[in-house]
Amino acid sequence: MIPGDKVICIDARIDPEKAEEVRRDFEIWITKDKEYTIREILDNNGIVPGVLLEEVHNFPKYFKLIGRMQEPAFALWRFRKLNYASSTTEQLKEKELMEVERPHISEPNKA
């Protein structure tokens, strides 16, 4: 995934043990099955890759684990990339196959 990619949230669950921390760090949380656009991908010092989204902006916070201020990022594993081009291509291929496999029906001989 890269900035500009369209993604869909596949997991918006919050671990009950981390709910308080999440509420403190994120003013806005993501919604399962909603589409988003990747704004930026953060390495987070190699701990857990995270994404910032065009549709969601949270205030930067200080994160002790990475030792700096940054906007809280959502874990990359919470999203799946949407690939509109391939689904359109697949639909076209499917249509072509149906046309090729369809038996040709000729009109009866009108003699």
Image (spheres, helix red, strand yellow):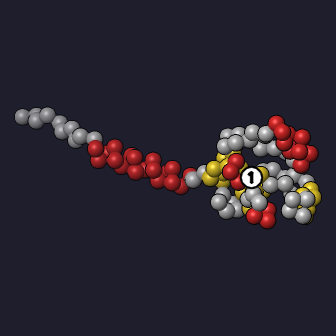
Asked whether the viewer can see residue 100, the reply is yes
Left/right placement of residue 32 relative to residue 27 reads left
Asked whether the viewer can see residue 35, the reply is no
Q: Which of the two residues, 15 or 29, is positioned nearer the viewer here?
A: 15
Q: Quadrant of residue 9?
A: top right
Q: Quadrant of residue 17?
A: top right
Residue 70, above or below 21: below
The residue sitting at 62% across, 53% down in the picture is: 81
Left/right placement of residue 10 relative to residue 21 reads left
Instruction: List x then y, in percent, for residue 107.
Output: 17, 36
Left/right placement of residue 84 relative to residue 67 reads left
The residue sitting at 79% across, 65% down in the picture is: 45
Q: Which of the two residues, 42 or 82, is positioned nearer the viewer here?
A: 42
Residue 101, above or below 68: above
Question: Badge 1 is on which residue?
Answer: 75
In the rendered image, which quarter contains the N terminus? bottom right
- Number of labels in the image equals 1
The residue sitting at 23% across, 40% down in the picture is: 103
In the rendered image, which quarter contains the C terminus? top left
Neighbour tally class for label 1: few under 14, some 14-19, many 20 plus, Cα within 10 Å: some
Residue farthest left in this picture: 111
Q: Secondary structure at mark 1?
A: strand
The residue sitting at 87% across, 52% down in the picture is: 58
Residue 15, above or below 60: above
**Amino acid found under the numbered disc labelled 1:** Ala
Instruction: List x then y, in percent, for residue 39.
Output: 75, 59
Residue 41, above or below 8: below
Instruction: List x then y, in percent, for residue 37.
Output: 71, 54
Instruction: List x then y, in percent, for residue 33.
Output: 67, 40
